[in-house]
């Protein structure tokens, strides 16, 4: 990627948890469980407007942030001397556009996008955010729900916490795992409109583990969600 490129991590993200209905998808392994993400970036400085629609996080060019500053940003999210800190330093050497705080901010936005897209059965949105394996799992869950005539009504309350737990670069493949603690209200109704799962008023707390990956050799700056788990 050229020095004039801007990268915005489009958190093509992550695992949905529409309470019990959604957690059945989140708990599903996708074949990418090795230890281990942001709306699309304005890729040219002349296209940056200084504003966004809540889906874009613009990262600085490589020549705008020196190593000292980039490593200070890493120290702010991972304790110096830890394996995670070391892994993030290696990742940012391979991908100088990576900024952990911006990545996490994008993850928060993407998380809500996916949760609500799953609840609404919005396959188009999901397909653009997920790897093929993860999308296939979500799509199958939506198909089952539709075949039974069930509907999900959800309200996203917010994310209490989002932390990077693992990072790696191997064979040009960079991966980042995030642990998210969220609050949401979700209720599932049968074809007759009767409540069969969840609660239309109670706020539930759910913890999920998302893993995102990107090929450094690709011209596509976007990350895709490649694995999901729910923390019991």
Image (cartoon, rainbow, N blue to C red):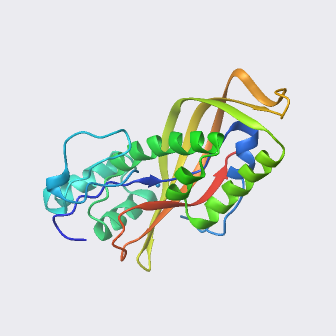
User: Whole-percent x and y of residue 205?
Assistant: 65, 32
* In the image: residue 130, left or right of residue 26: left
Q: Which of 19 and 128 is in front in this view?
A: 128
Q: How many labels does the image show?
A: 0
Camera sees residue 89: yes
Query: In which quadrant of the rendered view does residue 29 lie?
Result: bottom right
Q: Which residue is drawn at 24% across and 55% down?
A: 70
* In the image: residue 190, left or right of residue 33: right
Q: Which of 7 and 180 is in front in this view?
A: 7
Reply above or below: 37 against 187.
below
Reply above or below: 185 against 63.
above
Q: Residue at x 19, y 62 (%)?
A: 62
Quarter that holds the C terminus: top right
* In the image: residue 99, left or right of residue 4: right
Identify the residue at the far bottom of this view. Answer: 171
Camera sees residue 65: no
Identify the residue at the far top of this view. Answer: 201
Reply above or below: 15 against 4.
above
* In the image: residue 31, left or right of residue 11: right
Q: Which of 9 and 51 is in front in this view?
A: 51
Q: Which residue is drawn at 55% across and 64% down?
A: 131
User: Whole-percent x and y of residue 34?
Assistant: 60, 69
Reply above or below: 43 against 100.
below
User: Whole-percent x and y of residue 150?
Assistant: 79, 38
Query: In which quadrant of the rendered view does residue 170 lie?
Result: bottom left
């Amino acid at each position: 990627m050229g020095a004039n490129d801007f990268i915005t991590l489009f958190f093509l993200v992550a695992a949905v948890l529409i309470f019990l209905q959604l957690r059945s998808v989140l708990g599903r392994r996708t074949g990418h469980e090795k230890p281990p993400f942001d709306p699309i970036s304005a890729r040219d400085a002349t296209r940056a407007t200084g504003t966004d629609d809540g889906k874009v996080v613009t990262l600085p060019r490589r020549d705008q942030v020196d190593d000292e500053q980039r490593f200070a940003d890493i120290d702010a999210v991972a304790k110096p001397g830890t394996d995670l800190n070391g892994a993030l330093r290696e990742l940012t050497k391979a991908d100088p556009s990576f900024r952990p705080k911006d990545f996490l901010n994008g993850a928060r936005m993407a998380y809500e996008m996916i949760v609500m897209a799953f609840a609404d059965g919005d396959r188009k949105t999901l397909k653009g955010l997920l790897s093929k394996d993860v999308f296939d799992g979500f799509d199958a869950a939506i198909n089952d729900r539709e075949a039974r005539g069930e509907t999900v009504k959800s309200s996203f309350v917010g994310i209490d916490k989002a932390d990077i737990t693992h990072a790696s670069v191997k064979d040009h493949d960079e991966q980042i795992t995030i642990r998210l603690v969220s609050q949401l209200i979700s209720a599932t109704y049968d074809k007759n409109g009767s409540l069969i799962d969840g609660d239309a008023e109670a706020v539930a707390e759910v913890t999920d583990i998302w893993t995102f990956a990107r090929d450094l050799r690709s011209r596509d700056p976007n990350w895709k969600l490649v694995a999901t788990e729910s923390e019991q």
